[in-house]
Image (tube, rainbow, N blue to C red):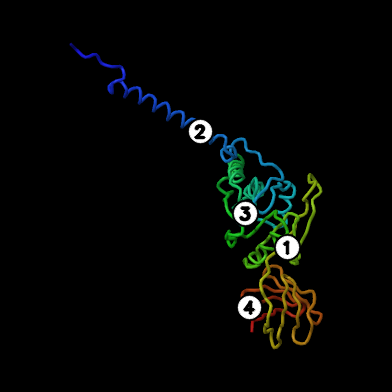
Amino acid sequence: MQRAHSSHSPAHRWPLMASALALALSLAVLAEARADAASPRAAATEDYVPDVGQDGKDVIWVPTPQTLVDKMLDMAQVTPQDRLMDLGSGDGRTVITAAQRGLTAKGIEYNPDLVALSRSNAAKAGVSRRATFEVADLFETDLSQADVITMFLLSTINEKLRPKLLELPPGTRIVSNTFRMGDWEPDASETVTEACQTYCNALLWVVPARVDGRWQVGGRTLQLEQRYQMLSGKLGSSEISDARMDGRTISFTADGIRYTGEVNGATMQGSAAGKGEWSARRI
């Protein structure tokens, strides 16, 4: 007698098991896709909208008014030859505006969702080649390649950054939205009143060349003491006055004569009003 084949024999179970496995894999892939779509990072490029006041690593997120973005860039006298870095770049508006002016600009932002949003905004503005964004800690970021640095951080954060900023090449421009840099007084300050309700003050600093010490000027010694961009000291036995640095440019008055010049490492050279050219070397 022929043995009847059971419907649960191995020959019949393999197709059923394969179908069940395929269904399980499909359900798993679908669940993962739904989870990805629901994640903040995926939403950042589509529907993600940051909340004003949301927590960040060091500060809460508050957007800089566009009118102040424009003022900050104007104060820094940016040109297409400049490289700009925005610390805490948020939704990317400062970097994008700089790129629209022809600059190469980079945003440093700790929140990856904001970085994804910024990249999307740059793409929509057509400036992705010049406006880039990096997920990074601003305290661990190399700032040395920037000609202009913009930021909207707290005063306490600015002060922590200050030693690093002062090491940048002389002439580097730093512009802050509202918040100061401790006892390093700004070189300029402006307030916008149009289309701005809060955080409407722009502060500019220019990194000064370091000139404190002794210099030989003709047959006299120029002794300089420096506190950020402000200078004091003597030329020979005469006190100098109205003395300051503007990046690499030095200016002071001695014996009623106004001296201006450019600092280049261990040398200076310039003109003295009514007295012709002058030069100095560090001693």
Q: Position of residue 213 (x, y in %)?
A: 68, 81
Establish if 188 lies above or below 22: below
Q: Amino acid at mark 3?
A: Pro
In the displayed structure, 91 sits above or below 21; it is below
* Mark sitting earlier along the chain (4/2): 2
Mark 1 or 3, nearer chain start:
3
Residue designated by label 3:
80
- Mark 4 lies on residue: 267
Q: What is the spatial separation of the Cα atoms under label 4 and label 2, in whole angstroms?
A: 64 Å
Going 68% across and 55% down the picture, which residue do you hit? 151
In this view, 40 is above or below 252: above
Looking at the rendered image, the quarter that the N terminus falls into is top left
- Residue underneath mark 2: 33
Q: Is residue 217 left or right of residue 255?
A: left
Across and down, in percent, residue 37 comes to 55, 34
Q: Earlier in the sequence, mark 1 or mark 4?
A: 1
Secondary structure under the numbered disc 2 in the rendered image? helix
Cα distance, mark 2 to mark 3?
Answer: 42 Å
Name the residue tied to disc 1. 181
Residue 255 quadrant: bottom right
Choose between 119 and 160: the one closer to the eye. 160
**Residue 58 appears at what percent x and percent y?**
66, 54
Q: Which label belongs to residue 4?
A: none
- Look at the numbered disc 4 and give the secondary structure of its residue: strand
Does 192 sit above or below residue 248? Answer: above
Asked if the residues shown at circle 4 and circle 3 are in contact, with their CB atoms under 8 angstroms apart, the answer is no
